[in-house]
Image (spheres, rainbow, N blue to C red):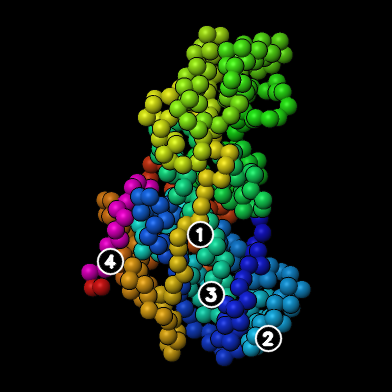
Amino acid sequence: MPRTNGQFSLPLLAQAALYHAKRVRAEATFEVVLRAGSSPSGAAVAAGAWWAARLAMGPLCGGDLGLADWAAGRAGAVGADRDAAYSLLTTPFSGRIHALLAGTAVPPGAPLLQVTGPLPEVYARSMIFRAALSTAVGAATAAQALVSAAGGRSVVDDASVRAAAPALSSLIAWCGRVGGMSGTTHARAGWEWGVPVVSVPQVGGLPSEASDGTVDADDIHASTLALVRRTKASDGPELRRVRLSRALVDDVDLERHFVLRRALDRHGLRRTRVCAELPPSPSAVQRIASADSPIDLVVFSQPWWSDANIAWLPAELPRGIEAAPRPDWALSAGRHQLVRHADTMHAIAWASEGLLKALTGPGRPLPTVPEVLAPLDPDRQPVSAHLEPPVDL
């Protein structure tokens, strides 16, 4: 995996370079905070902090000195100190990162991640943290909503592999797993992130002699018979998964899946699982659960993720530097730790013990793999959409 991706904003780099040139090395803390409206339930699922930390650790230029020279020149052209900008671009991050573990249920207003370090270093890297957590939290939260609607059925991601950027699409597949998906068809996600990689029947490909099959939705009985005969004639593996030739979008398609189940049973294929491609919405998934359909495995081949609604806010700044007023929905300025009691999350004065865990910093190398909460961990359970502030706020 890359140590950094060279992701930075020129205006933010220029401002950071001004602080750096003035030798403002005092520490600042910024945080990524969940806004309201990130999910229908109000709460979201934490994810992506490890990835953001990995991207931010190395030089901001990603080790590309040509990029560093060019960007420093552009920063100089807008009034920043060119040498200060170049120094920021080529120096590794020296700060500390605290974050919620992947899978933690989190209400609006709660910090997902806190970054503490020299102000210029933190400020110049803000886009890395904002982009990574917006994508990851949004994907994990969307996955959880779809899995919850499935009523215990297996849910498989077949969409992330169709996204353009390999590294980002692999991250999205992992976020689906954090949100509860059973697996993905994205092979790279299995290699990089350890996500279970599974096979599902494909539509429009070449005839297969594998353990998956596709049945013509307009002629289910004849197509099922032909599939059974072809499987037996090939002396291949037992037919494990079957799907119809088009996605399930309405009640007529839903009834076709009942017909498919009866056709499979008629030919003795009672252990063959019925797969269905659904539109990526909780309401569409809930419909098949409410109908007690024979669908065993839900597949999403269209993008099921969206960005989370987050904000990047200063928590503590060096003396003499004023920040804009914090939004009404956010906690007051200053660092806060999070603790949970039953189904309510509380903000308390900063302490080392709490839900925000030390992720990396001087003398603490970044773990080789991200830590993810176990499926039955209490911190994964639904949480009230209201964050309780400290009593003195």
Q: Which mark is residue 122?
A: 3
According to the picture, the residue beneath numbered tag 1 turns out to be 134
Q: Which residues are magenta?
A: 378-391
Q: CA distance from mark 4 to mark 1?
A: 23 Å
Q: Which mark is residue 76?
A: 2
351, above or below 14, in the image: above
Give the structural element (helix, strand or loop) at label 3.
Answer: helix
| Residue 280 placement (x, y as % from top left) | 50, 41
205, above or below 226, in the image: below
215, above or below 331, in the image: above
Drawn side of residue 281 relative to residue 94, left or right = left
Identify the mark nearer the N-term, 1 or 2: 2
Q: CA distance from mark 4 to mark 3?
A: 26 Å
Name the amino acid, label 1: Ser
Q: Nearer the viewer, mark 4 or mark 1?
A: 1
Q: Residues within 10 Å of mark 1 (few under 14, many from 20)?
A: many
Q: Are marks 2 and 4 in contact (CB under 8 Å)?
A: no
According to the picture, the residue beneath numbered tag 4 turns out to be 389
Residue at the spot 47% in from the left edge and 30% down from the top edge:
250
Q: Nearer the viewer, residue 93 or 324?
A: 324
Q: Quadrant of the C terminus?
A: bottom left
Drawn side of residue 152 relative to residue 369, left or right = left
| Residue 151 placement (x, y as % from top left) | 40, 33
Name the amino acid, label 2: Gly
Q: Nearer the viewer, residue 37 or 372?
A: 37
